[in-house]
Every structure is written in C-alpha cells, then in structure tokens.
Amino acid sequence: MPSLRGKTAIVGAADTVVGKVPDLSATELCVDAALRALADAGIDKDEVDGLVTCQSMAEPHLYHAETVAEYLQIFPKYCVTANAGGGTTFSVIRNAAAAIVAGICDTVVVSMADSLRSGLTRDQAMAMQSSTGHPQFEIPYGPTVPAYYALLARAHMDRFGTTSEQMAAVAVSGRNYAAQRPGAQMTDVITLDDVLESRMIADPLHLLDCSLVSDGGAAVILTSAGNVGKFRSRPVYLLGMGEGHSHEHVSQARDLTTSAAVQSGREAYAMAGLAPADIDLAEIYDCFTPVVLIELEDLGFCAKGEGGAFVESGASALDGALPMNTNGGLLSYCHPGNPGSMFGLTEAVYQLRGDSGPRQVRDAETALVHGQGGIMSSHATLILGKEQVL
Amino acid sequence: MSGHEGKFLPSPDPGTLPYWEACKRHELVLQKCVQCEVLQFYPRTICSSCSSSELDWVAASGRGTVLTWTIVRHPVSPAYADEVPYIIALIELEEGPVMMAQVVDCQLDAVQSGMQVHVCFDDWTADITMPNFRPRDNNGT
C-alpha cells in the first residue's frame, strides 16, 4: 500500500462556541462548525466534495452526515457518519485521507458536534449512561462510565504505584492551559488539593478527574497536498496515522494497564518516520485523568508505569518536555461526547500555525493527536507537521 | 426478590440462556471448547480461540480473585440508588476467565486487589438471578 505520509493536509480548522450553548441544537452546532472551518480555509461550501460527521446523542439522525449535507445544501460524493466516540474520529479522518489519495474526492469537511449539556432529555441522558457496557454481563451490576475507567485506574495504581496526586496533576495541567484559552468551559486555575478534595465519583476518581459535559463542535477541512495553494490558511500535513483495537467491554480487556494505543502509535510513528522524541506537543484523549497516563506510556513518551511521574514532574506544561492538551482538553476546555477528539485536532492545527497565543508552544513543528473510545478499546493516532518537516 | 425494580435486567438469548438458567439454580457455569478445551466467559456460540461451535457447559469452582475494583458513589440510575456505595470489580475465576460482578458482604475499606472471593447469588426476579462475589472465608467458600 502506498504511504499516506504527507499526501493530505488540513487547510481549515475551527471550533464553535463551546460549553453551555443552549441556543443551538446539535445539528446546528455541526453546521456552524463546518461553516467556520470553510471560512477559515477561505473557500465556499461548493468547493468541498466530501463530508464526514459523527452521530449525535442529543439529536440523532439515521443518516447524520446526509442530514447535515442537506441542511447546508451541499452535494458531496463522499459522505460518512462516524457512529462512535473518541477513537473513531481519527479513524474516519484516516479513511477520508485515503479516499482523497485514492481520488474518490478532493476536499472533505470533517465536522462533529453535539449538545450533551443542553440538548439531552432526562431519558436520553439515562439511556446514554446505561448504553455503555455489556447488556447482559456488565450493565446489570450498575457500573457507571467513571466506574469502568476507575477499574483501569486502580489496576495502574496496584501495578505501578501510581498515586491519586499524580492523576490529579493531569487535571491541574489541563486547567492551567484552559485558563489561557479564551472561551474554555472551565478557566479557574485549580490545585492538586482541589482535585483530591472534590467529590468521589467512583474510587479512585474524584469529580475533577472526570471530563466535562458540554455543548460544542469543531471542524477541519482536509484536502490533497497538491491542492494546498488554493486555500488561504497555512497547511498542516498529515504525516502519520495508525489505529489499534483490543476489545469493546472492559471485562474482556486483555490487559488493564497497556492499551491498543501501542499499536496505533507504532503505526503512526512508522508512517511519519518520527519517534516520540521528535514530537513537539501532544493532544491526547483525557476523558479521565488516568487514561492520559496510560496513553503517554503506550505512545512512548515515557516508560510503562511512569506516566504518573512524568506528568507530576511538569513535563506536560508549556515549558515542559511535552506540552500536552494545550487547550485544556476534555477535562477543562469542553467534552460534548462523540466529537471530543476534534478539539485536540483543531488545537494542534492552531499550534502548528503559530496561532495559539499565550499557550503557544515555541517553534512547534510536529504534533501528535490521539483519540480513544469505548473503555480504552479503540485507539487512533494522527501525527501532524508543518511544511518544513514534510 | 425485592428492591430490584427498574434495574437493567439482562435479557438472555438462546446462546446465553443456559448460563442464566444455571444462575437460577445457583450454579456458575463456563463454556469449554470440545475441540481445543479453552474455557471462556462470556458465553458465545463459538469458541473465542478456535472458532469451533462445539462447546460444553462446565461447572466453575466459584472461587476467584479480585483483579481490580471501584466503589460506585453516584448510582447509574435511581433503581441503584439504594445500593450506593457499591463495589464493582473484575473477578478472575480460578479457571482463568474474567467477569464483572459486585463484591457484596464486604466492608468498603476492606476490598482490595488480590482479595480471594467466592460466588454467591442474588435472586432478582423469577427469571433472573445475578452472580456476585463475597470475600472467601477460611473454609474457602
């Protein structure tokens, strides 16, 4: 198979207003994100021939992407709805890149949004919570989503001596960035004690170890590398892409402390021709703080078991070895569910363009973004770079 | 058989019905592949190792070890509110397979990974009995 390295580029990126956005429905947020990304790219809607969306929980459509295309009155020849969460976002972007390289389409708008904070009915919220897990062999016992992740956190603590303070350091790091990100849902700086003293949700996870519930959307415009001159923004190239899938239900996980991020990262690094040490910043999925520690280890940024010490040392701060989740992440910027990974992607694009203001990583040329979904089940990694690293 | 109204009841299907029927008899069973002798949980119509469809049901010892655990403080739905805080754990059965369950009859500050547990059964309805686990006593039961 020919390599996809450097064959496609992101030429537009935008977020909607995020946090609590009761005046826009989930579908309207998706449309809004797409229009903002088109404006950022400086193109008209008729110049895209592909559309990728994700399913909404608040306002689901049987044919989601087609509904958004109809709303926008665009008529794509490539039209895909991603039907699940964090990991699939970057899976479908890899597929879209492959479709562009194969000549199936030229320019794709990837727009994902939901309104979990304002748009869910009580019944929908309940259905969402209880839809995670095996219907016969997990859900009847009454686990919650935080509880599933707490099982992994506990295993990491037992095996490697990871502490609650080290997990809390992930939340503190993210909040420090969110305080510098205009429009972030949570901008008040927090301390380790704030995290440790917040309400226990599912031991060892406190409230502030858990990500937000938000409204919001984000979109990017993906096109072939040969096309980038037609757009007004500075292109950010897709250098590496990989996926790994190990299970769906946590009780069937083959390993509680090592994830399929190992495989997705390995593939992405190999395609990019880069190693973890070559990455200038990372935007990695932080639905719960311990997830970040496992991903940092599995993506090779530190040794297995040392994720807690890595973050505790300050490595994820702006002046650290690996500035991480520089918009505040799902923990502090926003988390509208399925679209969650998109905000890390748009932030990585802003960083590589040099547009991140007070949270700008100096001389950033490469970025890794990582999404995961299920309960550490499905993983996808993208490595992005500026023209200089092509 | 009270206090379970509104909970998320499992809906047995033809492939899992023998498991749930055994639970009603207060027996924990596993599937064993006739071809490659691998034991598996959860029940499937095929062997998850060799894909053979020749599977036997065999009795599990009921003994297991807590692999990892959490305490749910915020219930998943109102039907579980009376039970909080409750312990959810992954149990590695003596035979090898892993299953999720609650750990019951256990002080919250006593639960830990590596704890030796034994299956017990909770009759939720006329049709559904849930296997849970409780700390093993000195007799191994």
Image (cartoon, coloured by chain):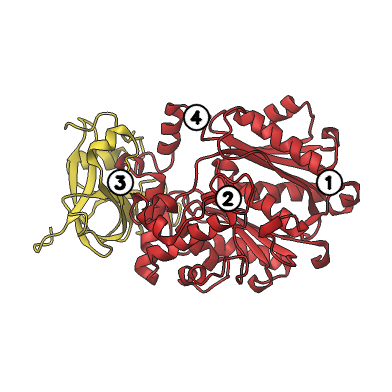
Asked if residue A26 is positioned above or below residue A102 in the image, the reply reads above
The residue that disc 3 covers is B73
Q: Kindly indicate the quadrant of the structure image that contains residue A209.
A: bottom left
Question: Is tag 1's residue or tag 2's residue first in the polypeptide sequence?
Answer: 2
**Tag in front: 3 or 2:** 3
Image chain in yellow: B
Q: Is residue B108 left or right of residue A366?
A: left
Q: Kindly indicate the quadrant of the structure image that contains residue A370.
A: bottom right
Q: Is residue A374 left or right of residue B135?
A: right
Q: Are marks 4 and 2 on the same chain?
A: yes
The label number, if any, that marks residue A87 in the structure image = 2
**Tag in front: 4 or 2:** 4
The residue that disc 1 covers is A103
* Amino acid at circle 2: Gly
> What is the CA distance from the residue labelled 3 to the residue labelled 4?
23 Å
Residue at the spot 83% in from the left edge and 66% down from the top edge? A388
Tell me the crowding category of disc 1: few under 14, some 14 to 19, or many 20 or more residues within 10 angstroms, Cα based. few
Asked if residue A356 is positioned above or below residue A26 in the image, the reply reads below
* Cβ–Cβ under 8 Å for marks 4 and 1: no
Q: Residue A106 appears at what percent x and percent y?
A: 83, 44
The label number, if any, that marks residue A120 in the structure image = 4
* Cβ–Cβ under 8 Å for marks 3 and 2: no
> What is the CA distance from the residue labelled 4 to the residue labelled 2?
22 Å
Is the C terminus of chain A in the top left, top right, bottom left or bottom right quadrant? bottom right
- Residue B47 can be seen, yes or no: no
Chain letter of the residue carrying label 2 = A
Is the N terminus of chain A in the top left, top right, bottom left or bottom right quadrant? bottom right
> What is the CA distance from the residue labelled 3 to the residue labelled 2?
28 Å
The label number, if any, that marks residue B22 in the structure image = none
Kindly state the secondary structure of the residue where label 3 is placed: loop
